Image (cartoon, grey):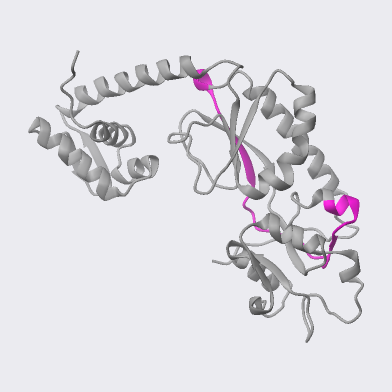
Amino acid sequence: MRYNLPPLNALRAFEATGRTGSLSAAARELRVSVGAVSRHVSILEAYFACELFERHHNGVDLTQWGKPLHTAIATAFDTIDAACRDVDTGAARPIRLRTFTSMATDWLTPRLGEFRQSHPDLSLQLKQAFNDISFAVDPLDAAVTAQTIVESGIRQFELFPTLFTPVVTPALKTDTTRNILTGDNPAPLLFTRREIPFWETFYEAIGLPPPVFERGLEFDSLSLTYQAARRGAGVALGLLFFVADDLAAGSLVPASQTCIDVQLPHYLYIRAGRKKHPGTETLTDWIQREAARTNAGLDALFGTVLSTPVKTVMKR
């Protein structure tokens, strides 16, 4: 049967707008501009030659024509979604976990061998996130991020506080020719562009003038700054749970006793309800145990090589 339907993108935009009650919320969910959503809705209204929404300054409401259409379209999308999930479910499919590069490289990957040994029946697909994560858009089962995700059908678990302190090799810290963070011959700063506000926040918290990045080395990822720091190239701003293993092994040491808490926790997010992969709970339990183990190791540093974290707000 050939279906005489309006454009599917217009139907998606209409469904999301009607469900959220907002053009901007629908745009965020669909990862398009508000203007694009508005155009799609207008296309649909022109197709049916009637108004589907009443526009207000703080949102939209479905009209008498929009309400039954939205119910039918939402039901149809639910049916399609359920059918796709039926094809895509089962332990034979990998659990799809997304996180950013440094989390994957510096914390998750070194621990995955133990997960596979403990759960050989489960397969895990780990993908890097280069943009904001959305369960509504991406085919995901779980995600680890400091990003705030507010979507229906998603549960969250706090894993780590976001604690920073500069880290260097023991040899660089004992180099008497350098004052690591200040003076005429400081150690080169190892940084990424996104880290600059965190560096500035740290320097402000300890009462120092703004850092001089022109003398440092810029990298594309946090992981590369840590690799360079391990080889004595300079001082990296250590996100503590990333460098916990280095601190425990002594390959990196704090360059300062001060530690800042920028109050942006890292969370594990998972799908809940009927859309949940059957292995998600197992993965969740394992990640939470590993996070608790990492946090316990870091707690042992406070009061010894690190002072109690200073709560602060990141500079923008």
Q: Nearer the viewer, residue 154 or 190?
A: 190
Q: Nearer the viewer, residue 143 or 251?
A: 251
User: Residue at the spot x=41%, y=15% of the render?
Assistant: 83
Q: Please report the residue visible at 50 percent of the width from the left and 19 percent of the height from the top.
A: 88
Give the image quarter of residue 190.
Answer: bottom right
Answer whether residue 175 is visible to the viewer in this image: yes
Rendered residue at 15%/22% (across/down) = 4
Residue 206, position in %: x, y? 74, 72
In the displayed structure, would residue 195 be above or below residue 67?
below
Query: Where residue 111 sits: x, y (%)?
Result: 77, 37
Camera sees residue 51: no
Compared with 133, 255 (above or below) is below
Vertical placement of 289 versus 276: above or below? Answer: below
- In the rendered structure, the answer to whether residue 26 lies left or right of residue 230 reads left
Q: Quadrant of the N terminus?
A: top left
Q: Nearer the viewer, residue 267 or 279?
A: 279
Farthest left residue? Answer: 49
Q: Magenta region: which residues? A: 246-275
Q: Quadrant of residue 92?
A: top right
Residue 242 in the image: state x and y as whole percent. Answer: 74, 50
Q: Is residue 174 one of those drawn in magenta?
A: no
Left or right, 306 with reference to 215: right
From the top left corner, tell me how far across and down residue 11 is, in percent. 25, 31
Describe residue 16's horizontal placement relative to residue 274 as left or right: left
Q: Quadrant of the C terminus?
A: bottom right
Q: Is residue 112 left or right of residue 17?
A: right
Query: Is residue 264 inside the magenta stretch?
Result: yes
Q: Quadrant of residue 187?
A: bottom right
Q: Residue at x 55, y 22 (%)?
A: 276
